[in-house]
Image: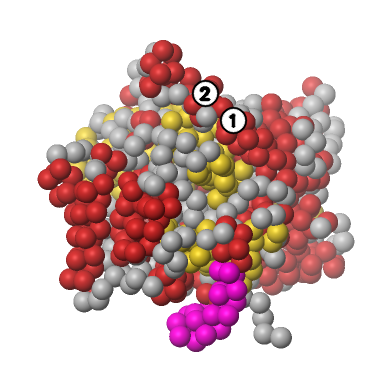
Amino acid sequence: MDKKRVYTFGNGKAEGKADMRNLLGGKGANLAEMNLIGVPVPPGFTITTEVCQEYFDLGRDRVVELLKEDVEAAIKNIETLVNAKFGDVENPLLVSVRSGARASMPGMMDTILNLGLNDEVVEGLIRKTGNDRFVWDSYRRFVQMYGDVVLGMKPVNKEDIDPFEAIIEKVKQEAGVRLDNELSVDNLKDLVKRFKAAVKAQTGCDFPTSAVDQLWGAVMAVFDSWMNERAILYRKMEGIPAEWGTAVNVQAMVFGNMGNTSATGVCFSRDAATGENLFNGEYLINAQGEDVVAGVRTPQQITKIGSQRWAERAGISEEERASKYPSMEEAMPEIYNELNRLQQQLEDHYRDMQDMEFTVQEGKLWFLQTRNGKRTGRAMVKIAMDLLAEGKISEEEAVLRVEPNKLDELLHPVFDKKALLSAKVLTKGLPASPGAATGRIAFFADDAAKMAESGEPIILVRLETSPEDLAGMTVSEGILTARGGMTSHAAVVARGMGKCCVSGAGALHVDYKNRTVEIEGHEFKEGDWISLNGSTGEVYEGKVETRAAEMDADFAKLMDLADKYTKLKVRTNADTPHDAAIARSFGAVGIGLCRTEHMFFEGEKIKAMREMILAENQEDRVKALKKILPYQQDDFKGIFKAMDGFPVTVRLLDPPLHEFVPHDIAGQQAMADQMGVSIQKIQHRVEALCEANPMLGHRGCRLGNTYPEITEMQTRAILGACLELKKEGVKCFPEIMVPLTGILYEFQNQETVIRQAAEKLFEEKGDRIDFKVGTMIEIPRAALTADRIASRAEFFSFGTNDLTQMTFGYSRDDIASFLPVYLEKKILKVDPFQVLDQKGVGKLVRMATENGRAVRPDLKCGICGEHGGEPSSVKFCHRVGLNYVSCSPFRVPIARLAAAQAAIEDKK
Ligand code: PEP
Ligand code: MG
């Protein structure tokens, strides 16, 4: 038998059902389901999404042939159910034709209402309804929609005016009226006449009069709209494949524009913004669906409480509200009661918040659509927790109901919605660290610190940042850079601090000398206001008010549930006691990466560090390192204390030494004065440290292997801190991590230095402590020889920032220069520094884990690159069998939720 292409529904029967959304589209599947559960829906039929593909493969004529018989039968079915005839003059059936894809694509594709009208049918319908205004109003709407959508009269360029709208404006002007609904019947007739003339003039053809021709035209236009520019763009944004196609839904028309007992509206079973369990929505009396959306008239609230809240916000008195803007609950109480009952029935049936469309035709309520409603992050959490408490969904379902990334909205400040409406976007960079920030521009770290003293919020604007800017970043609300990708210094550090950051905004022209920045023709000086959205990468002109994040009981409940189901542990990347404490409050169970280099930039530490760098022999280096030791030990004490018995992985010094010396003359002079040496000496050293490829240069364990005294000092500082804390009764689980290992012997040598330094310390102190020695796996060669490395290393931590950099050969600091083009050309689907490349980099992670564990079955494996807080990457880590992921403190909750979802999905 040939496959089924048309599915009918109506009067409590349906050939489809809710779980057939792939074939019938979301709208079609739910229209069928509503019939099956007794919700009143105008009868109709759905042409499947498969036909959409056939249309593009076989063309219009062949598809009409394939559909003809079934469509005719389905139309007959509607005719019987509503007792009217398609194309008949005396008792005409009018239909709507709507698109409906598998995933909701609001407003992206086309709709045609009132189909089946022509000059004779209009007369017949007037005789039948006795309502000439309604009929002519419907006719003019139909000719316009059909002309725009099917006959291609809608201007391609959105700046151009729609020819029909131009005619409406002219007629309104001639009639001396302001609103569409003030047009007289004669005006409406005039409109239809002029519309048809415009069709003839523009297309060379008469407006089609046959209902059947109109129907085929509309069906094919809906298929065509799957490929319109808007739809293509939306699919790209949402990652919806073009092969899915759209279904077409044809339904008997019901009219909300038949007078004052008719209406149309949209409603939600709960509040989509807050999640509150409060039925709400808007409606318009005597109107058709698109009027609510188009904003021609101001819709009124459905519920009394909604209406009262609206009036309060608008400053309207209760008296005025009740008389001028009554809610549906007050104006049409019977219909309202039915609507309220049915919305609850739909929510109970779908077990989720519903977004519904309805029409009231002369006192009779019809549902035209229901779907799971879109909602904010806050609402998403509240609704999931409420539905669980109401016994409507299981714990697993509640965990799966929340998109991990949406938690960001609950963790960081956001822009005030109202303020955002009038804010002007200047440019867009990379969304490097989420949240919203507004403040005055500072270009230098020390200026930022000074300006912040007066209590002003600061936005640090830099070409790029380096560890020297740390103090400035700490006092700023947000960071904006012209260069650098998602794992650039600015991005990584900002995420660690939970600060908003936009990086790689190429349109910025920073002039440090004059302390100005030019963005798309606008010049800003130090002290001027600017605002950033680190979640979207948008940069706004001036001050845009923000709202602080609030965490609530629902969030805590969700996190508890996540922990109940998760297998993967979530640690944090933190290098200060403050960040460690934040991460603990978000539920981190250890530190997966403590980058020790960030500790060297404060006060006396940088002095001693620079002394060490300037040292010309080992003896002088050791002397300088001795000065650093007590500071390091103190720093580690703070961190171990904050982690209070949870494991802490401390990484030995990693970045190239040139990052610790100033590169500008003023800075070099200051350093020379401080150290009591000539500026030339400093400059010599700086020059000597310069490398053509610093990322591939003298860094990571190459430092510790050439200067083992650094490794010795750091080992003493880490274990010395733990021994002191042991005396205070604080439990410590130190894990010492060697960075950038590529060869077993690189690791082995470092391990020997570490173990010897430890033994020496234990002997001196007369006490000891257990510790582990492991390595980062961030060089492809390390991943490829993981079995050898695991013969000595007690744990692996995948540094997927460097591993991505070296696997792709993309500089993590310079990817912004070509990434947008690569995304545009679809060479890359996503930024691999944000989302783990499972096929390539992920393959190395999987292989190294398996090969490492083959040699050492209890090898602890984790990830500490930026991917450790990205949901799809976290899920991958679960599937590979890692023990933990480690991410910046503010991403801990996101990772915990994603990890729990991965475990639940696995079980299924
Ligand atoms: C990494 O390379 O993934 C990593 C965590 O180290 P860093 O970002 O400090 O190079
Ligand atoms: Mg690294």
Q: Magenta region: which residues?
A: 53-76
Q: Quadrant of the N terminus?
A: bottom right
Nearest to the observer: residue 620 or residue 395: 395
Looking at the image, which is closer to me, 288 or 130?
130
237 left or right of 23?
Answer: left
What residue appears at the point 39 percent right and 47 percent down from the top-left corner?
Answer: 130
**Which kind of residue does numbered mark 2 sit on?**
Glu
Give the labeled residue for mark 2.
Answer: 330
Describe the element under mark 1 as helix, strand or loop: helix
User: Is residue 681 visible in this depiction of the protein?
Assistant: no
Q: Residues within 10 Å of mark 2 (few under 14, many from 20)?
A: some
Secondary structure of residue under mark 2 = helix
The amino acid on which the numbered mark 1 sits, given as a three-letter code, is Glu
Looking at the picture, how far across and down is residue 334, in whole percent?
59, 30
Q: Residue visible at 39% across and 67% down?
A: 228
**C-alpha span from label 1 to label 2:** 9 Å
Ligand 1 closer than 8 Å to the CB at disc 1? no
Judging by the rendered image, the residue that carries numbered circle 1 is 334
Residue at 40%, 18% in the rendered image? 323
Q: Are marks 1 and 2 in contact (CB under 8 Å)?
A: no
